[in-house]
Image: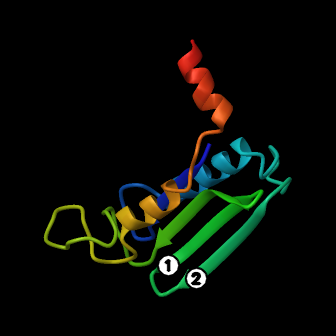
Amino acid sequence: MPAIIVHGELDSVVTQANAEQLTRQFLRLNGFVDAAGNRRAGDARTETHADGVVSDYVKNGRRIVKTSIVRGLGHAWAGDDDTVPFHSSKGQDSSALMWEFLKHQRRPAETVRDAFVA
């Protein structure tokens, strides 16, 4: 199951530990790590840039888990309009980031077919 996690490093409502725990849970669910957190499969790619830190976890050539910790962002939607409550111009455009991640996700053909055979 793919997952994208975006979190503001200055969020005072939801702790950054939540993003870290979600990342570990989805890595385990997708077979990247075992119960002890030891790597079992896949590759991790982490980039640090002006907007924050982005980690991609790739397995069999497919990005399965993506985590973005947005520098300077509080409890808000990143890369948007500062005049709207709970939105911030800080960081990458979260909508674009999520679309870029999700547009490549596909259910295995047998799963889709089985959903209509019931």
Tag 2, which secondary structure? strand
Please say if 28 is above or below 55. above
| Residue at x 67% of width, y 30% of height | 110
Please say if 63 is above or below 79. above
Give neighbour class at mark 1: few <14, some 14-19, many 20+ (Cα, 10 Å).
some
Q: Which residue is mark 1?
A: 52
Q: Quadrant of the N terminus?
A: top right
Q: Is residue 44 left or right of residue 20?
A: right
Given the current orientation, which residue lies at the most extreme left position? 83
| One can see residue 11 in this view | no
Give neighbour class at mark 2: few <14, some 14-19, many 20+ (Cα, 10 Å).
few
Q: Amino acid type of disc 1?
A: Gly
2 and 62: which is toward the camera = 62
**Image quadrant of residue 41?**
bottom right
Q: Is residue 65 left or right of residue 30?
A: left
Q: Position of residue 29 (x, y in %)?
A: 70, 41
Number of the label disc, if any, that sits on residue 48: 2
| One can see residue 96 in this view | yes
Q: Are marks 2 and 1 in contact (CB under 8 Å)?
A: yes
